[in-house]
Image (cartoon, rainbow, N blue to C red):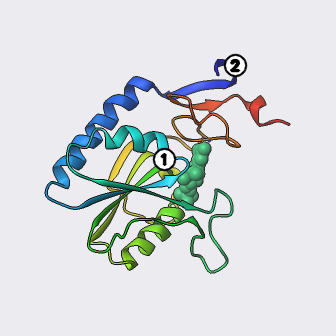
Amino acid sequence: MKERIEKVLVTEDEIRTRVAELGADITRDYAGKDLVLVGILKGSVVFMADLMRQIRMPLTIDFISVSSYGNKTSSDGTITLLKDLAVDIRGRDVLIVEDIVDTGSTLYHLQRLLAHRGAASVEIATLLSKPERRKVDVAVRYVGFEVPDEFVVGYGLDFNEHDRHWPFVGVLKPECYQS
Ligand code: 5GP
């Protein structure tokens, strides 16, 4: 692991503390509601697993998969679903759980899609956000950390399907991108 890391941006301790804060905020904000956490595969799985254990109220979880980075929008500007939800979200309060908001395009389209299906509300929780990169104005209710415009990996985020299992968020050494 160490030989691939240029620098650590968010440490394991910082993530643990912030995820507990987010869980407390969500527990307070959704009290009495029918909460459905919708994780976006695969990047959100680590955040999802930690966040749900910090939410102290009944909830349901499900996962959705949309077309991957670089080809996530189809020609008509909508997202392509690779795996749909299994649960019915009609009348329920959906919280989309995402690894990182970059341009905002994926979440903008997904939020509209789930709202169109009759959810009572559709909000967004993301571990990371890159505000400098935003192209689409998407309202993100819960943000773990803002990060600079650098390609980050770890804690669920990958480079070519590697490095998702790092317990922190970091930046790869330039040589990792060669070959
Ligand atoms: P958006 O639609 O906001 O432009 O893109 C969001 C998706 O792009 C994220 O879910 C993630 O898959 C990918 N992405 C954006 N920035 C990064 C990054 O710095 N590192 C990694 N590993 N994925 C990223």
Quadrant assignment, res 16: top left
Q: Which mark is residue 68?
A: none
Q: Nearer the viewer, mark 2 or mark 1?
A: 1
What crowding class fits label 2: few (fewer than 14 Cα within 10 Å), some (14-19), or many (20 or more)? few
| Disc 1 residue lies near ligand 1 with CB under 8 A | yes
Image coordinates of residue 124 in percent, x first then y, are 37, 57
Image coordinates of residue 167 in percent, x first then y, are 50, 28
Residue 176 visible in image: yes
Which residue: 48% across, 44% down? 45
Which residue: 47% across, 51% down? 131
| Disc 2 residue lies near ligand 1 with CB under 8 A | no
Quadrant assignment, res 141: bottom left
Q: Is residue 89 above or below residue 40?
A: below
Residue 103 visible in image: no
User: Which residue matches tag 1?
Assistant: 44
Q: Earlier in the sequence, mark 2 or mark 1?
A: 2
Residue furthest top in the image? 2
Image coordinates of residue 76 in percent, x first then y, are 62, 81
**As shown in the figure, which amino acid type bears the numbered disc 2?**
Glu
- What's the CA distance linking mark 2 and mark 1? 25 Å
Secondary structure under badge 1? loop
In this view of the protein, which residue sits in the foreground, 151 or 131? 151
User: Which residue matches tag 2?
Assistant: 3
Q: Is residue 73 above or below residue 59?
A: below
Left or right of 31: which side holds 14?
right
Which residue: 42% across, 74% down? 112
Which residue: 26% across, 73% down? 91
Which corner quadrant holds the N terminus? top right
Quadrant assignment, res 66: bottom right
Residue furthest right in the image? 179
**As shown in the figure, which amino acid type bears the numbered disc 1?**
Ser
